[in-house]
Image (spheres, rainbow, N blue to C red):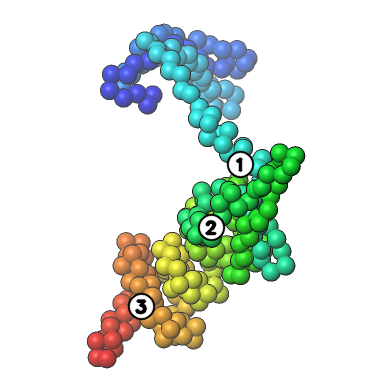
Amino acid sequence: MGLKGNDCVKAKYYFYAIQNNGLRMDIGRASHNFNYWTQTSRYNVNMQSLLQHDGSITLGCDVEFTLEDLILEYIKKDESALYSKALLQNMWQNKEFMDCVIEIGEVSINAHRSVLAQNSEVFRRMLYTSGFSEGQNVRKTRKRSYQAINNGIVKITDCSSECFQAMLEYCYTGIVSDDIMNSHAEELFTVAHKYEISPLKEKCENFIAACIGVCDISRICQIVHLYGSSILEKAVAKCISQNRDILTTAEWNDLKRSHGELTHRLLESVIFGHAKWLDLISLKFYLKCIEYFFYELEIIYLY
């Protein structure tokens, strides 16, 4: 029943069998207070009288539950969070009162500085040190209205406009489209890392990790080396453990020369991190890894 401790539930139950003519035959009915490990009453049944033409027996049970001393608790939804999310989505869709321009080559993307600053500490520092104050961006006209002047312009040179647009949309909506993830996941990861947007970075890490194949090992190792992603490093180690021939390729030899420390960590993870899942087929492979690992350590020691 899933009851714990002194929890109690009152149940009315009705046991019956279906006869050859399709009618129900009563076996027993009762009410009972159930606590943890409580058993119901037992009933004697004439099995022969219940046999169907094909030799089977059809039994049924109807149960009604009534909770004793039931206390209803009103749990209030966090409506403010839902409202805030909807508000940001509307700000992104309507694109009104945007006070910042992101220039990427010939492309200009409008945004709200407050949204950029709330999502990224890097943007907060960038906008603050650039001297973008509210006084710089408005002036009072003779008609006592306000017009934007000297709008803050941020020039971006380290990513594509598509990638930055996707990152900006995530800041407003918390969503990245499947098409963008399929085509820009790695670039989006690097940009999220640079601008310290941790939730987006982790989202990209998990997506990339789920898609890693043998042909991706070298490229993903470069990313791990540059940005220190533990999620991607574990995914690479898992891919190596499932594709043993990687260790005999020229690509792996190149990685050993360029990123020796990383390849040693990967081998450690493959050998020791997955040891508890060893089977007879994999044993020879893991022993070979151990032999290779200590051989590499000996070379390092000699040097």
Name the kind of residue labelled 3 in the image.
Glu
Question: Horizontally, is 180 left or right of 18 in the view?
Answer: right
Locate residue 255, reporting x and y percent: 45, 81
Mark 1 = which residue? 88
Kindly identify the residue that appears in the image at 56 percent across and 17 percent down: 18
What distance separates the C-alpha of mark 3 from that of mark 2?
A: 43 Å
Name the kind of residue labelled 1 in the image.
Leu
Mark 2 = which residue? 131
Callout 2: 10 Å neighbours few (<14), some, many (20+)?
Answer: few
Where the C terminus falls, by quadrant? bottom left
Where the N terminus falls, by quadrant? top left
Kindly identify the residue that appears in the image at 24 percent across and 91 percent down: 302
Circle nearer the N terminus (3, 2): 2
Question: Horizontally, is 248 left or right of 3 in the view?
Answer: right
Name the kind of residue labelled 2 in the image.
Gly
Q: Secondary structure at mark 3?
A: helix
Can residue 30 be seen by looking at this rendering? yes
Looking at the image, residue 61 lies above or below residue 90:
above
Kindly identify the residue that appears in the image at 68 percent across and 50 percent down: 148
